[in-house]
Amino acid sequence: MPRNKAIVIGSGFGGLSAAIRLGARGYDVEVIEKLDKPGGRAYVYEQDGFTFDAGPTIVTAPFLLEELWALAGSKLEDDIDLREITPYYRIRFDDGTHFDYSGDAEAMRQEVAKFSPEDLEGYEEFLVVSRRVYGVGFDELLYVSFDKFRTMLKVLPDLVRVQFFRSVHGLVAKYIKHPKLRMVFSFHPLLVGGNPFTTTSVYTLIQHLERAHGVHFAMGGTGVLIKGLANLIEKQGGSLRLNAPVAQITVENGRATGVELESGEHIPADVVVSNADSAATYKYLLSRTRKKRWTDRKLYRAKYSMSLFVWYFGTNRRYEDVDHHMILLSERYRELLVDIFDRKILAKDFSLYLHRPTATDTSLAPDGCDAFYVLSPVPNQKSCIDWKEQAEPYRQAISQYLSETVLPDLEDHVVTSRMLTPDDFGDRLSSVNGAAFGLQPILLQTAWFRPHNVSEEVDGLYLVGAGTHPGAGMPGVISSAKVLDEVVPDPA
């Protein structure tokens, strides 16, 4: 008997995870991908002997991956070599001091005391709060579909109990007084597209998530995980079609019936799952469908995440004293975030995430070389910055700063280089406003207020990925696919 057909638009972590889950339930799954390789934001660039992960580099919830491998009858450890990184991050301040952020409880106490011994008690209290938030936000709500408002009402008391109405920085500041330590324990929302001063405090669960499960790196790069997930889909009998941009989700009598490719080909389906940017799904892929909630007007007025400028580069020498993950913070913290999120101007200073995977895996670069990427949060395309003009000067400014701080004589040693700007997020990755993480994780764009995993506009359409519940970040997008187990009916 023919199996029910499910189409998944997009092959990011959310889309691939959705395909595996649907395949395990008996659907005939086809993943449709616009680019020439799977991955979406987790695309891989290879040039001049160097391998660069385009986006995600941090694995904080290995058990979510283990579950996907198990659904396909395999074991994660047979295919993937995950290594825990220590420290998780070295956080460098503008004055040259640094905080080594790790999962070692005593080492963390020593790092806190190095800056402010009087904050030790508040730090311990904050850890208790983070664990409590994790118990609600991760254990209870991560896999819940918020397609009904009564679900939101049901969990509201728990959310109030963990002070979800505060911002991340606001909750941190309640327990920790030293300004540098407040930066250390509030920067995490930037990893998922949020401003620490406006992102709901539910995201303080990340501290406990990292502490409980560690920060890991997949040997061979994040792209190895993408390849592994794609192989699981094929093992289940599913397929992945590349170089096939979707033009429209086809709808008849209010129900999704498949997709129409830009080539004009129509692929029918019983179930359609969109791993495309949620705003783009409603604005572009359903442009022929009249919408009740996610209208163009509402999408225009929504709050979008910042975008990113990313410089990928390889050097002909190794920088052995540079950690795998390093965060370099500007002297301005709140003021810089205002420039990025609110004023939408390209400031002269920047805070950076420097990724040196060859600190852990030397196979990602030729012998004696290092592979890097440096990421700078920047305004999204609503800023109207001309990146054709600004990209190279901005790269040069970052290069000079790195040369003066942690990578001496950098420009003399760069042997390969490429850049990613907000225009790439907007054009290549089809993200509305070039937002790197879709909608911001502010209070009124979280849970029920976010685009639902069950489309409010079209029956038979489901959403996964950063723009729906629970949100951005590898654990979030993988978990969005787990929500489908609750809301997608079993195949006939």
Image: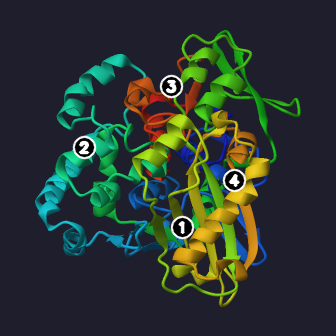
Q: Nearer the viewer, mark 3 or mark 2?
A: 2
- Check if mark 3's residue and mark 1's residue have beta carbons within 8 Å: no
Outermost bottom residue: 368
Mark 3 or mark 2, earlier in chain: 2
Q: Circle 1 sits in a helix, a strand or a loop, which is it? A: strand
Asked if residue 3 is positioned above or below residue 69 in the image, the reply reads above
Residue designated by label 3? 454
Mark 1 or mark 4, earlier in chain: 4
The answer to whether residue 131 is seen in the rendering is: yes
Q: Circle 2 sits in a helix, a strand or a loop, which is it? A: helix
User: Front-most of 487 and 264?
Assistant: 264
Gap between marks 1 and 2 measured at Cα: 27 Å
The residue drawn where x is 75% and y is 59% is 392
Quadrant housing the C terminus: top right
Mark 4 or mark 2, earlier in chain: 4
Q: Quadrant of residue 223?
A: bottom right
Gap between marks 3 and 2 measured at Cα: 31 Å
The residue drawn where x is 20% and y is 55% is 127
Residue designated by label 1? 354
Residue 155 spot, x, y in % from top left: 25, 28
Q: Quadrant of residue 434?
A: top right
Residue 401 spot, x, y in % from top left: 58, 69
Residue designated by label 4? 38
**Image position of 422 (left or right of 473):** right
The residue drawn where x is 72% and y is 59% is 393
For residue 171, which numbered disc appears in the image? 2
How many tags in the picture?
4
Asked if residue 234 is positioned above or below residue 318 in the image, the reply reads above
| Three-letter amino acid code of the residue under disc 2 | Leu
Gap between marks 4 and 3 measured at Cα: 24 Å
Q: Nearer the viewer, mark 4 or mark 2?
A: 2
